[in-house]
Amino acid sequence: MVGELVELLQLPFIQRMFIAGFLASISCGIIGSYVVVKRIVFVSGGIAHATFGGIGFAYYLQFMLGWMWFDPLVGALIFALIAAIILGSPLMRNRIREDSTIGVLWVVGMALGILFIHAVDRSKILVQDPVSILFGNILLIKLQDLYLMVGLVIAIIFITILLYKDLQILTFDEEFARIAGVNVNAMNILLLVLVAFTTVVLIKVVGVVLVIAMLTIPAAISGLFTHNLKMMMILAVFVGVITTFGGSLLSLNYDFPPGATIVILMGCVFVVSLLGKSINQRICLVKTE
């Protein structure tokens, strides 16, 4: 078993798989903590599903204009940023209910993706299977995908370090942030832009549909054990690395879909953590009595 694993680790696509999993864990641990604390999970879902339109748009441009350099991840990033700016725009937030805007972006993004991909002649353009786009296939990650993911993760880390205090205040108490002189509108848009970056990083790992799970579960697990935002981020990254690597190995060993396996393992860890914390609290309560 160990010998087979060593042989697998020597394959370039397996190496790319683990590198991508590590990058995804960093981004989901950092930004996922903001998402969970600020309770914008469904906002993140709207951004994630809008990216499907961008992926389809990239394939359509490759087919119609011959823009083979226009990678689907670039299309996903463009659509994610547009969705983030729309959702964070004060004009949209003041005039339309947020859940309505999320719903529109969610379904329109998915519908556009389907239409664009349908319009592509697959005998001329190699189109990734829509199922693997929706649910991810970490084994299909290319070297250029890793370059984009590395760039996005570096941007996420840099912006988070640079504006950590403002983002922390915004996340915990938006009204206090406004009183403290923080530009709340700009910071809300920036936070959603960071969510957009993270979404694009996660797409190749778990797919469009399962992005919400990876963005939420590691941070939710870490939130069971600490309320300190920095510690929450660090623990969420650790949980993400362990579950992503573990899920990837299980998918290789048993020929399971990688994205779904990773998310299911995360879900199992969450349930065990929740039960463990509950049992520990009861034991402590009994001891105090």
Image: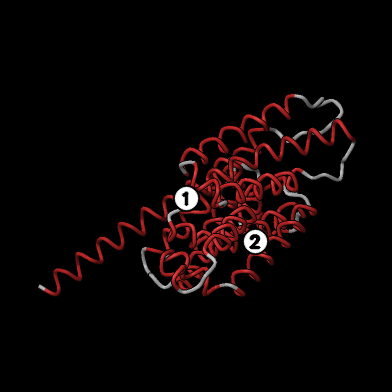
Q: Residue at position x 50%, y 48% from top?
A: 93
Kind of residue at badge 2: Leu
Q: Residue at position x 59%, y 40% from top?
A: 49
Q: Residues within 10 Å of mark 2 (few under 14, many from 20)?
A: many
Q: Which mark is residue 41?
A: 1
Which of the marked residues, 2 or 1, is nearer the chain's N terminus?
A: 2
118 left or right of 203? Answer: right
In this view of the protein, can residue 115 be seen by the observer?
yes
Mark whose residue sits in front, 2 or 1: 1
Q: Are marks 2 and 1 in contact (CB under 8 Å)?
A: no
Q: How far is the residue under mark 2 from the one under mark 1?
A: 20 Å
Q: Residues within 10 Å of mark 1 (few under 14, many from 20)?
A: some
Q: Residue at position x 79%, y 54% from top?
A: 143
Question: Which residue ends up furthest to the right in the rendered image?
Answer: 66
Residue 21 position within the rendered picture, expressed as x and y whole percent measured from the top left: 63, 57
Quadrant housing the C terminus: bottom left
Residue 73 position within the rendered picture, expressed as x and y whole percent measured from the top left: 73, 47
User: Relative to the observer, which residue lies in front, 170 or 25?
Assistant: 170
In this view of the protein, can residue 255 be seen by the observer?
no
Label 1, secondary structure: give it.
helix
Residue 159 drawn above or below residue 128 = below
User: Relative to the observer, which residue lies in front, 7 or 91?
Assistant: 91
Residue 146 position within the rendered picture, expressed as x and y whole percent measured from the top left: 74, 56
2 left or right of 239? Answer: right
Quadrant housing the N terminus: bottom right
Label 2, secondary structure: give it.
helix
Kind of residue at badge 1: Val
Q: Which residue is mark 2?
A: 23
158 left or right of 123? Answer: left
Residue 8 position within the rendered picture, expressed as x and y whole percent measured from the top left: 70, 54
User: Relative to the observer, which residue lies in front, 77 or 253?
Assistant: 77
Residue 29 drawn above or below residue 76 = below
